[in-house]
Image (spheres, rainbow, N blue to C red):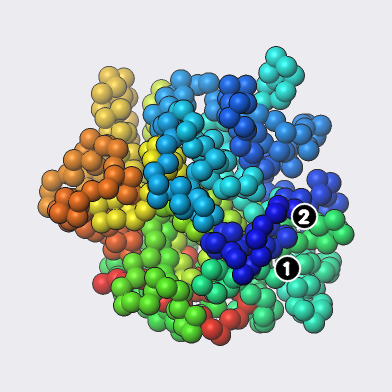
Amino acid sequence: MYSLTSPDNALSTYHLSLQAPFMHPEYYPLEQQLPADRYQPVAAWYGRLILPRGTERRTVRGVLFELYLTPADQQELRGQVVRLRWSLDPSVQARVYSTARTVNLVPRAVQGAAEWRTFPIRVNHWRLVNGLESLAGSHQIDDMQAYLIGDVQLADDPDGTPCLYINRDPVLASGRYYALVTFLAPANEAGDLWRVAHFNRETRQFDGAQEIVSLPPIQPMIHGVMLSCTDKLNESPVNAQGWYIYGAQDHAGTFVVRALAPRALLRVQPQRVLLGAKAAHRFIRKELWRDTAQHKGQIQSVLLSQAADEGTALQAWQVGDRALLIHTYGAIGGEMTEPPAKTPIYFGHFSYGVATIVQEPLADEPSFDILYHQVYAHNGDGLVSATHSYQHYTGDRQRGWLGARPVADLLIRLDSLTTPFCVYGEAYDPLEQLSLAQEMMMARYRIGDGRGFTSVQLMNNCSQDANQALYAAIHYVDQTLSEYPPFKEWLAAHPDEQTRFANLIQLGRDIRRVLLPFGVARADWRNREENLGSSQNLNPLIQIPSALLSWRAMMPPIAQRAVTDVMIKHGAAVWVLRSDQVGGHDPRIAPRAPLHW
């Protein structure tokens, strides 16, 4: 176990969270004995990120990765520490080195690291730190677990060490395996053991095998708020439809629940369907955050569609389809109101992501697989600017927001944006370009463009920079395809695709017009200058005029509404996923909507 100070001497929420033994990798043995009909691995490649020593960089050329899960034909690699590197593909290398910086932490970042905040002290004074090194080095101990997406290639170095080559950022996660259960009752007086019943695919009920699972007590945030609780968990309004529980067995063989996700929220089955653009605009503007406090403990799943009828609206969402995700959250209010929400103004947080419809095997039904691209400033909560799975960012019992905040995830399906253009067998994917742009922005945030420090300011914040990446992604597709001679020939032969491409370009212009309402692009948006967060200490007299040029992008709920309105005007369907402090009941807190109008 890592040597840490006592809770009384905790320096940050992240530092305090490490007092919970179940948060440490060694709490879980490598060998897991879980029945395959009840538990599924979260991914083919899953493990723990380990930052190499500075003297190992030349050999490792990336980071180390302790493997907990591997594909069936690579079982011998489980438990091994392999080298994790970026793909040698020229386009990947160009992307990686465009964000690599020599890191020299400013004094404020050094002080933040001493307080166990997410400042990258372990890569201080390293030359050309790449995105994998900054990700593994964001925490002061090697406790981050992740799974791999995209193209994964296995090869051996000359010394015989296995190496994995990847072309996409690892996805942060909170558990190797997951199950689908309903909570029946506490199994002990302490309330940290619960009897659960597994879902039965044949009967479509929770009358499967029963067992005892562990929900160990979590540590509070530094100001005392508990991000989740187990009190009356079986009385939660979402318990009847079940929970996805994520984790692994401890050394006694008991499954430890690290994270939760309500099945009712992730099912591709809405509670309501509203038809027509007018109804969609009205919901986003008037109902999205209405009566937030009264919805404590509940979820909302609402499909906004411009289809002719409900059947057609639902038919448009099929396994394999993807959607742009726009995420915001509100405040922790009530008796234990968090410090930032003790004033009337609370803007919340904004990010983009991608939702993919998958056929979830345990329920044997379509389900949303959600990834967040969190452009996140350095903080004391342990949250890293990175790609997060739903189970990690929202559902993690110790660090996620599911039980503590109101959350709004809008899933947007727009053919011109979410369906690739396939030109003579080569795919040009606007949504993929957005994800890559976000990954580059997140890598820059992790090291503050070399200064090791980013925080929220007027001119640059999570919302501004995430929207700059959206603007850049659409502009990139426009420039790339418009300057590609075979594309013009291909468009002439495919009039439907010509219309779709024209819609995408107009979408980009409309988003720019809404986010830059004065009609003039900010210089850093136009030229992609190296301004982000407070990596540059700009004078407020300089910041304010620049911020006003993109004021809608500055405020998370306003940016979410503005971008969504543009998408709806272009014919998009929107699936609204809302949750308000879902899980066990904590009467000391109440959900509070972010400031919006």
37 to the left or right of 83? right
Q: Which residue: 76% across, 50% down?
A: 26
Q: Residue furthest top?
A: 158
Disc 1 element: loop
| Nearer-the-camera pick, 569 or 75 | 75
- Image coordinates of residue 331 in percent, x first then y, are 42, 72
Q: Is residue 503 visible?
A: no
31 to the left or right of 514? right
Q: CA distance from mark 2 to mark 1?
A: 12 Å
Which residue type does callout 1 highlight?
A: Pro
- Quadrant containing the C terminus is bottom left
- Image coordinates of residue 469 in percent, x first then y, are 34, 43
Displayed quadrant of residue 500: top left
466 to the left or right of 373? left
Q: Which residue: 21% across, 38% down?
A: 526
Q: Indicate which disc, 2 or 1, sits on the residue closer to the N terminus.
A: 2
- Image coordinates of residue 529 in percent, x first then y, are 26, 37
Displayed quadrant of residue 491: top left
- The numbered disc on residue 27 is 2
Which residue does the numbered mark 1 point to in the structure image? 216
Work out whether 382 lies above or below 83.
Answer: below
Q: Which residue: 39% across, 70% down?
A: 340
| Nearer-the-camera pick, 75 or 216 | 216
Q: Is residue 249 visible?
A: yes
Which residue type does callout 2 highlight?
A: Tyr
Work out whether 192 lies above or below 391.
Answer: below
- Image coordinates of residue 69 in percent, x first then y, are 73, 41
582 to the left or right of 37? left
